[in-house]
Amino acid sequence: MNVSKRHGTYGFDAPGAIAGLLFGAIGLIALAVISFVQDILAAGIAFLFGGLYTLASAASYLYTTRRGKFAVWAEELQRLQGDERLLDIGCGRGAVLLMAAERLGKGRATGVDLWRKRDRSGNGDSTTRANAEAEGVSDRVELVTGDMRDLPFGDDAFDVVVSSLAIHDIRDAEGRAQAVREAHRVLRPGGLMLLADFHHTPAYEATLREIGVVDVRRRDAGWRFWYGGPWFGTTFVEARKPA
Ligand SMILES: C[S@@+](CC[C@H](N)C(=O)[O-])C[C@H]1O[C@@H](n2cnc3c(N)ncnc32)[C@H](O)[C@@H]1O
């Protein structure tokens, strides 16, 4: 799968965060220039380092949201056989959902979301539908409006459940635990769960262990999934529902 040849438009994760980093960098570099003009050398150097550091963070964030996370997920999705029923929780504009659908020639990819715009620029099921058309997979994609804490699907309905950078959007810990329990409920025995997030992943693992999942582990998703730097990296929680 060539991730640089996506035909849909996928926007930016948390657009406010990128804007904050870019404005912060510009502000710090402007302060550096002012300090140098006024001959305050130490302050100028400090502001310059701060500005360049913040600029590098913005570049890392932009790379991840536009390219890196696609590359990482493309590798993760290579394990699909092609006939699975897959659910993407908090699918947004379909970054992961539609790459999965490309691999599901005999399967089905379902995306569920509340389409909140503050979490993803240009969010909306019409955007995701248009992306599915653009990627040529609309025949095997279904979009459902729903809350991940109360999924509108029956028990054991999916072979694979994925989620990327979505569960953390729930503010309270009990709500996030409920979302993980729901992901487990709709997964068939023996099915694969793959949750990527940059916060709270130890709690996701703990929730799964509490409900009896023993085949569960966390692993670092690597530099291509950094949102600004290594201090804001992404972790995968990978689990198999007991058969
Ligand atoms: C940062 S976006 C990530 C979208 C997509 N997974 C991706 O990687 O591009 C998080 C998504 O979670 C959705 N979301 C937030 N809270 C939700 C909830 N309680 N139930 C369903 N979706 C939710 C948002 O609408 C948004 O589309």
Image (tube, rainbow, N blue to C red):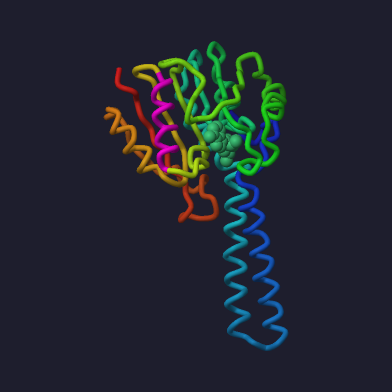
* Residue drawn at x 31%, y 38% as measured from the top left: 206
Q: Is residue 99 magenta?
A: no
* Residue drawn at x 62%, y 59% as measured from the top left: 21
Q: Position of residue 80 (x, y in %)?
A: 47, 21
Q: Is residue 174 magenta?
A: yes
* Residue drawn at x 57%, y 24% as measured from the top left: 111
The magenta segment: 173-187
Q: Where is residue 236 in the image (x, y as percent from the top left)?
A: 42, 38
Q: Which residue lies furthest to the bottom in this view?
A: 39
* Residue drawn at x 57%, y 14% as measured from the top left: 105
Q: Does residue 8 appear left or right of residue 164 in this picture?
A: right
Quadrant in which residue 120 is drawn: top right
Q: Which residue lies furthest to the top in this view?
A: 106
Where, quadrant-wise, is the N terminus in this rendering? top right
Q: Does residue 201 appear left or right of residue 40 in this picture?
A: left
Q: Is residue 70 at all visible to an observer of this figure?
A: no
Quadrant of the rendered image holding ligand 1: top right
Quadrant in which residue 176 is drawn: top left
Where, quadrant-wise, is the C terminus in this rendering? top left
53 or 191, which lies in front?
191
Q: Does residue 231 appear left or right of residue 140 in this picture?
A: left
Q: Position of residue 41 (x, y in %)?
A: 62, 85
Quadrant in which residue 114 is drawn: top right
Q: Say above or below: 169 vs 229.
A: above
Q: Say above or below: 12 vs 83.
A: below
223 or 150, which lies in front?
150
Q: Say above or below: 17 vs 175.
A: below
Q: Is residue 235 at all visible to an observer of this figure?
A: yes
